Image (cartoon, helix red, strand yellow):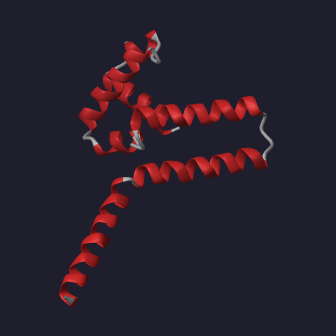
Amino acid sequence: MFVGVIITALTIANIQSLVTSVDAPRLNYQRKMEMIKKYMRYRNLPKGLQDRVLAFYDYQWAKLKGADEQEFLMELPQTLQQQVTNFMCRVSGHLNQCVNVCHPKYTLTFILQLFRT
């Protein structure tokens, strides 16, 4: 009987740990949002501006679910970084004609600097 109680307790603890680890990105997002709200209240930002800031983070969460886009790009090999960033910038229209005609090596350097800042 004692063994059954221990096994049940361990099973419940493991399930709780699993549920907590699965929801970790959401928990991090909620903590970040609370810190942002406290900061905005501390700085007495206007309500409209606060709403825009919160809407931005809600949008980011809805699209990326806590994934760090810059970290993702930095993990890729340089050639894949170049291809992904070139595609993203050309599709979104952030590159002007001058950058589009640059040598790919300089285009990559320019784009990576944009994403790092």
Which image quadrant for residue 2?
Answer: bottom left
Q: Is residue 49 left or right of residue 44?
A: left
Q: Nearer the viewer, residue 2 or 65?
A: 2
Residue 4, position in %: x, y? 19, 82
Taking the view exactly as shown, the residue that stands out farthest to the bottom is: 2
Q: Kindly identify the residue that appears in the image at 47 percent across and 13 percent down.
A: 96
* Lateral position of residue 18 relative to residue 46, left or right: left
Q: Is 100 situated left or right of 54 in this image? A: left
Relative vertical location of residue 41 with respect to residue 24 in this rendering, above or below? above
Image vertical order of residue 53 relative to residue 41, above or below? above
Measuring from the top left, give residue 71's x and y in whole percent: 38, 45
- Looking at the image, how many numbered discs can be counted on the residues? 0
Q: Residue at position x 55%, y 53% from top?
A: 31
In front of the other: 12 or 76: 12
Identify which residue is drawn at 67% across, 32% down: 51
List x then y, in percent, for residue 73.
34, 39
Q: Quadrant of the N terminus?
A: bottom left
Residue 113 shows up from this direction: no
Q: Residue at the front extreme?
A: 1
Residue 56 visible within the image = yes
Image quadrant assignment for residue 109: top left
Height in image: 91 above or below 59?
A: above
In-front residue for pair 89/64: 64
Q: Residue at x 37, y 23 (%)?
A: 88
